[in-house]
Image: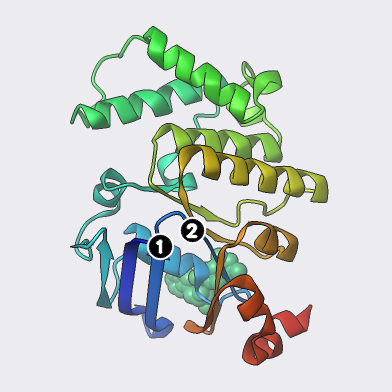
Amino acid sequence: MTRIMEARAIHKSYGLVKVLENVDFDLEDGEAHVVIGPNGAGKTTLFRCLSGETRINSGTITLAGDDVTQLAGWERVQRGIGRSFQVARIFPMMSAFENLIVAIETRERKDKGLWSSFGHIAPRHAVMDEAERLVLELGLEDTRDESAGTLSHGDKKRLELAMSLALRPQILMLDEPTAGMSPSDRAEAVRLVSQVRERYGLTLLLTEHDMEVVFGLATRLTVLHHGEIIASGEPHEVRADARVREVYLGQH
Ligand SMILES: Nc1ncnc2c1ncn2[C@@H]1O[C@H](COP(=O)(O)OP(=O)(O)OP(=O)(O)O)[C@@H](O)[C@H]1O
Ligand SMILES: [Mg+2]
């Protein structure tokens, strides 16, 4: 396996509150790496540090061997990081389909080095076809023409996922993708995420509280507790770890 992301000795504080302490974190190409830990453990903060949404106090982060510690979030997006709710803002007044068109056109502009969005890029056949394909793949047929703002929670998550995929990231980061879903929507989301992961050859990095989702998706698990990594490894190893059972799984 190739290591595509490497974080070393990350420290992150908000004011006097130390949130991450001396965190080392690796992401291998093609894995589905799930970060778990109790509420307030620092999972979302770790994501924000890795995606460049917030700066770290000390430490280094590399992507494919390049030091990106000083790069802004959008520059890391250019290097293949896709973070669902950051890169895929949904426009509530537009239909699900139109939102997809916007996401695809954003990627096209990016590929052409056109970051400004002056004027309107007429939807070409290729863009339309790709949007239709995403609609099918993510089960958005019934909600295709509905205003995105009126979609159910589950459909909104599906649309977000479709929009993230439209940007063709190498690494897809999902922070609690099944939060607020019913058990059946959850099972469906797991199926969908596994499917797109395989089809697009994605490396997945996600946080999740639901243990069925965690063990349904993870090829590797990392446990954060009070801002420190207390275990990392294959799901069965982490599950058997005494400290993990004590501080986390033991609660359930
Ligand atoms: N912007 C911020 N300013 C100040 N403190 C923050 C900020 N973001 C997070 N924190 C604090 O950092 C700690 C970790 O928060 P974080 O959101 O990373 O935890 P989490 O593991 O994602 O929790 P959850 O499972 O509830 O999503 C918490 O104590 C939180 O209050
Ligand atoms: Mg969180």
Image height of 83 relative to 14, above or below: above
* Relative horizontal placement of residue 179, taking residue 73 as reference (left or right): right
Does the image show residue 94?
Answer: no
Disc 1 and disc 2 in contact, CB within 8 angstroms: yes
Does the image show residue 156?
Answer: yes
Residue 131: mark in rendering: none
Q: Quadrant of residue 195?
A: top right
Q: How is the image coloured?
A: rainbow
Camera-nearest residue between 99 and 9: 9
Quadrant into which the C terminus falls: bottom right
Mark 2 Cα-neighbour bin, 10 Å: few <14, some 14–19, many ≥20: many
Image coordinates for residue 17, horizontal then vertical, percent: 42, 83
Q: Which amino acid type is shown beneath numbered disc 1? A: Glu
Looking at the image, which residue is at 67% across and 30% down?
Answer: 151
Q: Which amino acid type is shown beneath numbered disc 2? A: Glu
Mark 1 Cα-neighbour bin, 10 Å: few <14, some 14–19, many ≥20: some
Q: Secondary structure at mark 2?
A: loop
Image coordinates for residue 175, horizontal then vertical, percent: 54, 57
Furthest residue toward front: 1
Image coordinates for residue 34, horizontal then vertical, percent: 56, 64
Figure quadrant, ligand 2: bottom right
Looking at the image, which residue is at 39% across and 25% down?
Answer: 104
Residue 31: mark in rendering: 2
* Relative horizontal placement of residue 9, taking residue 28 as reference (left or right): left
Looking at the image, which residue is at 39% across and 13% down?
Answer: 126
Camera-nearest residue between 227 and 198: 198
Q: Identify the residue position indicated by label 1 in the image.
A: 28
* Relative horizontal placement of residue 4, taking residue 132 as reference (left or right): left
